[in-house]
Amino acid sequence: MKSKTAIYPGSFDPITLGHLDIIHRAAKLFDRLIVVVMVNPAKKCAFSPEERVELIKKCTTDLDNITVEFSDGLLADYAKEKQAGAIIKGLRALSDFEYEFQMALTNSKLNPDVETLFLTTKAENMYLSSSMVRQIASMGGDVSGFVPDIIHKQIINRLKG
Ligand code: PNS
C-alpha cells in the first residue's frame, strides 16, 4: 500500500524543541502528518491529554499539513484506521535504540502495512527530553532553550512548584 500520510506518536509531556524539529522535518516529507498524543503505560504524565494536544497545536500553527490528535488505543491500530504508511520516530542517543527497535518490530507485526521511519535528532537536541524539562521547570530552572517560545510561560506556570 502506498500512503502519503505519516503519524508522529509520542507522550509529548510536554512538547520540546526536539519534537518540534522532527515535526517540521516530517511535515516536509509527507503530504499529511498526524501528530498523535498517545498513552505510554510506563509514564505518569504531568499534563493532561487535552493540554498536550493544545500545546502542540499552539506551536504548529505555521504548518498547514498537520493535524494533532489524542488516542488512547494501540499505535498499530491507529495507523490502520488513518491509513498511514509510516510511523515517524525521533532517535536521539544510542540509549533510545533498543526500546525504539522493539516497538518498531512489534508494530510491524501488528500492522504489516506500516513502516517505522527514524529521523535522527539534531545534535543540539541530543540530550533534550520532556522529563528533563519537567524536572527543571518544577524546580524553578530556565527551560527557555528547551521548549518553543510560544508555550514557555504556560509550561513554567503549570509546572513550577
Ligand atoms: O514519547 P514516548 O513516551 O516515547 O512515546 C511512546 C508511545 C506513546 C509512542 C508508545 O508508548 C505507544 O505507542 N503507545 C500506544 C500504545 C501501544 O501501541 N503500545 C504498544 C507499542 S509497541
Image (tube, rainbow, N blue to C red):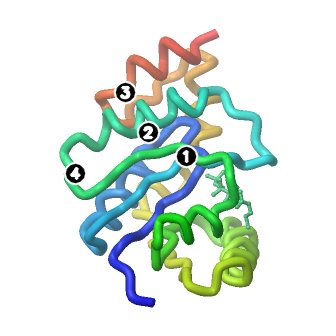
Task: First in sequence, mark 4 or 1: give its number.
Answer: 1
* 116 or 19: nearer the viewer: 116
> What residue sits 42% from the left and 69% below the top?
6
- Residue 139's image quarter? top right
Q: x, y percentage for residue 57?
A: 35, 38
Real-space CA distance between mark 2 and mark 4, rounded to the nearest whole angstrom:
20 Å
Residue 10 in the image: x percent, y percent?
Answer: 57, 52
The residue to which callout 3 is attached is 151
Give the mark toward the camera: 1 or 3. 1
The amino acid on which the numbered mark 3 sits, given as a three-letter code, is: Ile
Residue type at numbered disc 2: Phe
Residue under label 2, please give it. 146
Q: Amino acid at mark 4?
A: Leu
Q: Could you say which disc has been placed on residue 103 in the image? A: none
Front position in the image: 95 or 4: 4
Residue located 56% across and 71% down the image: 80
Residue position for label 1: 37
Foreground mark, 2 or 1? Answer: 1
Estimate how packed mark 3 is, as few (under 14), some (14 to 19) or many (20 or more) residues with alpha carbons within 10 Å: some
Residue beneath disc 4: 63
